[in-house]
Amino acid sequence: MRMLEGRVALVTGSSRGIGAAIAAEFARQGAAVAVHGRDSDAVNTVVTAICDGRGNAMGVTGDVTSFDQIEMMRRQIEDSLGQVEVLVANAGASLAPPAPLEDIPETGWRATVDANLLATFLTLKSFLPGMKQRGRGAIITMASSAGRRADARAPIPYGAAKAAITLMTQDVAAQAGPYGIRVNCIAPETILTARNREQIPATQQAAMAEFHPLKRLGTPEDVASAAVFLASNASTWITGTVLDVTGGAVMA
Ligand SMILES: NC(=O)c1ccc[n+]([C@@H]2O[C@H](COP(=O)([O-])OP(=O)(O)OC[C@H]3O[C@@H](n4cnc5c(N)ncnc54)[C@H](OP(=O)(O)O)[C@@H]3O)[C@@H](O)[C@H]2O)c1
């Protein structure tokens, strides 16, 4: 039995990386998936791969720091696939390099907080009212180990925004629980996406793996499995949790 049979899901930021793996796994588990990003070619590539594997997917594009654009995407998905029952607010980015606080430019701070915290807020703001009306829904937000503990090498605005996402997740879980909506958060450590494989030298990857009790870095599929669990009926008594998908690197 597939774990998401018949569900309609949106995974923001699924044109590549972790989101693309979540979208693919959701489709394998029977969901109709809206694949999202700003880069329409990348979105189409993911949609085509899912459909070639006999999955059901459509593509939507838009900037998740704009409420109007999210609302437009919501209407497109509702017209094509139906009401979204599973929402993964995964899109995010770290847009200021690691630096001492006094050297962080205000523009980098604002851009990073907007790309993560504002984007997650606006995405939930768009989809929650419909879920409340229908009395069902599963929402997953995407934080990071950078928001779970201090690290002198971490970009502070990214960690701060991700930490705020974990608290927002729990506040929304408390508000939306009585409406039959579960809201959980995934907080991954470094994941070997195509981008990270390219950007982190192999020797550094090996050194980083040593700090994980499970002695390896994560894969997008590790995060996708956690997302399927939190989206599915396997977790119907779980809400307001932050699931550290870290190979043991974070034990909160
Ligand atoms: N990779 C890791 O090691 C890691 C660890 C912890 C947490 N995370 C978190 O996991 C999530 C996914 O990370 P990733 O590494 O898979 O990222 P990625 O490969 O850089 O992909 C980011 C995705 O988000 C989309 N996106 C970013 N900003 C957007 C915006 N303003 N509007 C619309 N779409 C936007 C991108 O779309 P386009 O490219 O099409 O524009 C892309 O689909 C992020 O929230 C990240 O912070 C990642």
Image (spheres, grey):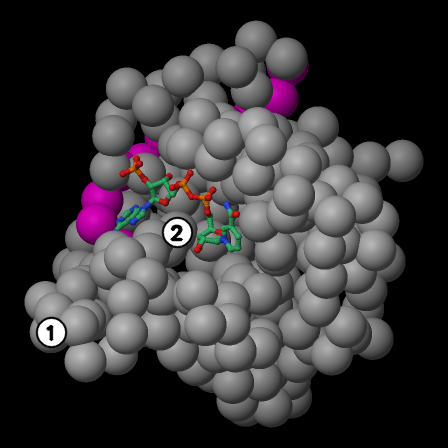
| Disc 2 within 8 angstroms of ligand 1 (CB) | yes
Report the span colored magenta. Answer: 54-64
Q: Which of the 4 image quarters holds residue 175? A: bottom right
| Disc 1 within 8 angstroms of ligand 1 (CB) | no
**Residue 230 in the image, given as x and y percentages of width and height:** 72, 59
In 3D space, how far apart are the residues under numbered discs 2 and 1 (Cα atoms)?
22 Å
Q: Residue at x 44, y 26 (%)?
A: 198
| SS under mark 1 | helix
**Residue 188 in the image, given as x and y percentages of width and height:** 61, 57
Q: Is residue 45 above or below residue 135?
A: above
Q: Earlier in the sequence, mark 2 or mark 1?
A: 2
Number of marks present in the image shown: 2
**What residue sits right under mark 2 in the picture?**
91
As for residue 103 lying within the magenta part, the answer is no
**Location of the C terminus (image quadrant):** bottom right
Q: Residue at x 76, y 54 (%)?
A: 212
User: Few, some or many C-alpha atoms within 10 Å of disc 2 (few <14, some 14-19, many ≥20)?
Assistant: many
Residue 107 in view, yes or no: yes
User: Few, some or many C-alpha atoms within 10 Å of disc 1 (few <14, some 14-19, many ≥20)?
Assistant: few
Give the mark toward the camera: 2 or 1: 1
Q: Toward the viewer: 188 or 45?
A: 188
- On screen, residue 219 versus residue 103, left or right, reads right
Q: Residue at x 48, y 35 (%)?
A: 200
Residue 130 in view, yes or no: no
Q: Toward the viewer: 228 or 217?
A: 217
Q: Which of the 4 image quarters holds residue 97? A: bottom left
Q: Is residue 105 above or below residue 17?
A: below
Amino acid tagged 2: Ala
Amino acid tagged 1: Glu
**Residue 176 in the image, given as x and y percentages of width and height:** 56, 83
| SS under mark 2 | loop
**What residue sits right under mark 1 in the picture?**
106
